Amino acid sequence: MSGALIVGAGQAGVQLAVSLRDNGYDAPITLIGAEARPPYQRPPLSKAYLAGSADDASLHLRTEAFYTERRIAVWPAERVTRLHLASAGSGVVLTDHGCTTVFDRLALTVGARPRRLDVPGTDLAGVCYLRTADDADRLRTHLAEARDVVVIGGGFIGLEVASVARTQGRNVTVVEVADRLLGRAVAPVVSEFYRQAHTRRGTAIRLGAGVAAIEGARDRVTGVLLDDGTRIPADVVLVGVGVVPRTELAAQLGLECAGGIVVDEHARTSEPAIVAAGDCTVVPNPMTGDGLVRLESMPNATNQARVAAATVAGAPPPRPEVPWFWSNQHDLRLQIAGIADGYDHLEVHGEPDQERFFVRYYRQGRLLAVNAVNSARDYLLARKELSAHRFGGEQRLGA
């Protein structure tokens, strides 16, 4: 019996399945995931789970009994290799283990993979990436035996891992090829704050530094060679240089891709009967409507999945939400709402030196985004303001 097929069993995939049932969708739902573990959440992997303060069970998105009760068939450890469309949105799927099923509605929630570093030595033991729970387990094991840790990449994953490693007493160096940290997400004033904050806590920050090679002995990492000839000792190297959306299946189906699977505000792909959600997608900028953006966050994956489910079920779409995100580094909680791309003016409120402040971003006098460090009340007020300006009213706030 055909029904909905959801390819990708992460946050977006599970939320899409749950929301389908919430919207009255009564046909079979099959959720296929490539990992052997039950569907789990990823944000704790670089935070509490890596630090050892959260266990495997706490990562699970739902219990086995929940899926059974909701009649959601979960296929773990199955990677989809072929999708054959018989008509718009319907067809048959084949996995790498030879399993097949038919479907009449298709959703792609396939996520993204870590961007690989193209230098010699990345195959040495002790060189890690962080995207899956298995990755986090390997990194945690290596950190337990390490003295010197090098993090390549000064984005959110890199800085969160650096903060965990430094808290555990490791010697930590962050190497970033750009001239500031978090350059894709925040203004220079916030980048500089985080440089100083990590430095105060004992982490060495190397900006404008390219990596020439990862060096090793007896097949294990011993250090990182920078392009200026500097050698940094390392027992563990974490590579955090971004992700690449998984668009292979979309391309196989002839769907439009542009740095991700292109979807509209209803999560419809270029084949309107097929929806997509999560880190694999690019969407019209929800704050301005200009251009396409990729929103790599758990809240976006959840919200977009709800939209996709409403589209499949023929239900009214949920209320739009302002994009939001958070990052925990040491005792610093950064909360972001909105998208600051294209800002022409910003205001800094509070005292960065006291590690409690927030930044408001504007374009032509209109609020675009806010960054708040240890300033939750100001963040929530600004998020309500952003929602009122963009969507004509307040939104329910969940973080």
Image: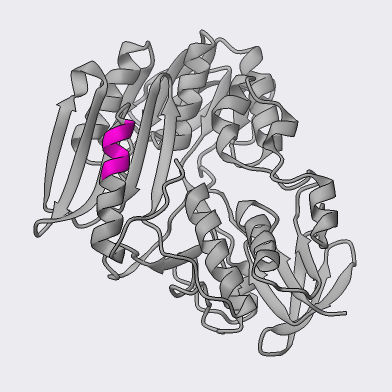
Q: Looking at the image, can residue 152 be seen?
A: no
163 on left or right of 55: left
Q: Looking at the image, can residue 311 be seen?
A: yes
Q: Residue furthest bottom?
A: 87
Task: Report x, y in % for residue 155.
Answer: 40, 37
Residue at the spot x=27%, y=58% of the render? Answer: 388
**Is residue 145 found inside the magenta-colored segment of the image?**
no
Q: How is the image coloured?
A: one colour
Position of residue 310 relative to residue 38, above or below, is: below
Task: Report x, y in % for residue 14.
Answer: 68, 56
**Is residue 377 found inside the magenta-colored segment of the image?**
yes
Specify start and end residues of the magenta stretch as a single range.
376-381
Residue at the spot x=56%, y=10% of the render? Answer: 147
Residue at the spot x=65%, y=31% of the render? Answer: 136
343 on left or right of 237: left
Task: Report x, y in % for residue 170.
Answer: 51, 11
Q: Quadrant of residue 282?
A: bottom left
Task: Report x, y in % for residue 126.
Answer: 63, 25
**Majority SS type along the magenta span:** helix
Residue at the spot x=51%, y=20% of the render? Answer: 164
Q: Nearer the viewer, residue 167 or 63?
A: 63
Position of residue 226 relative to residue 345, above or below, is: above
Q: Quadrant of residue 394?
A: bottom left
Assign the N terminus to one quadrant of the image. bottom right
Assign the C terminus to one quadrant of the image. top left
